Each structure stands twice: as structure tokens, then as C-alpha cells.
Amino acid sequence: PTQNNNEKNEEIVPIQPISSMIALSALDNILSFLINPPDGFAVELKNLMEIHSL
């Protein structure tokens, strides 16, 4: 039984680095998007900020 458990653990472990890499790349995309947003998005964001400030 212990051997089977070890095999299962070895299969599960590699999933974690991949998912964290995906999360990091997603964060990187979001950060680059916020730092340098498309013109249309910047306008929309300004409109939203004005609405909230009112």
C-alpha cells in the first residue's frame, strides 16, 4: 500500500510548479497590461474613475 501512495504523490507533485508558473505568467500579463494598457482601456478606466469620484 505504501508503494502505491508514493507513486500517487510523485504524479501529483509536478502539477504544482506548472500551475504556479501559469499563475506567475498570468500575473505578469496583468501587470504589463496595467502598466501599459491599450488606449481604449485607459479611456474606459478614466471614465470609471470619474464615475466613482462623483
Image (cartoon, helix red, strand yellow):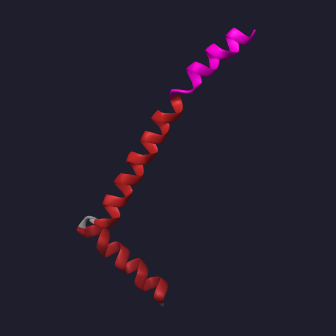
Left or right: 50 as drawn, with respect to 36: right
State the image coordinates of residue 35 (x, y, percent, origin top left): 31, 66
State the image coordinates of residue 6 (x, y, percent, origin top left): 65, 16
Above/below status of 3 relative to 46: above
Left or right: 14 as drawn, with respect to 34: right
Q: Residue at x 36, y 60 (%)?
A: 31
Above/below status of 1 relative to 11: above
Front-most of residues 24 and 3: 3
State the image coordinates of residue 22 (x, y, percent, origin top left): 43, 41
* 10 drawn magenta: yes
Which image quadrant: the N terminus?
Answer: top right
Marker count (numbered): 0
Residue range (magenta)? 1-14
* 8 drawn magenta: yes
Of all residues, the one furthest to the left in this rendering is: 39
Of all residues, the one furthest to the right in this rendering is: 1
The main secondary structure of the magenta stretch is helix
State the image coordinates of residue 51 (x, y, percent, origin top left): 45, 84
Above/below status of 18 relative to 12: below
Above/below status of 4 relative to 42: above
Q: Residue at x 73, y 12 (%)?
A: 2
Q: Residue at x 63, y 17 (%)?
A: 8
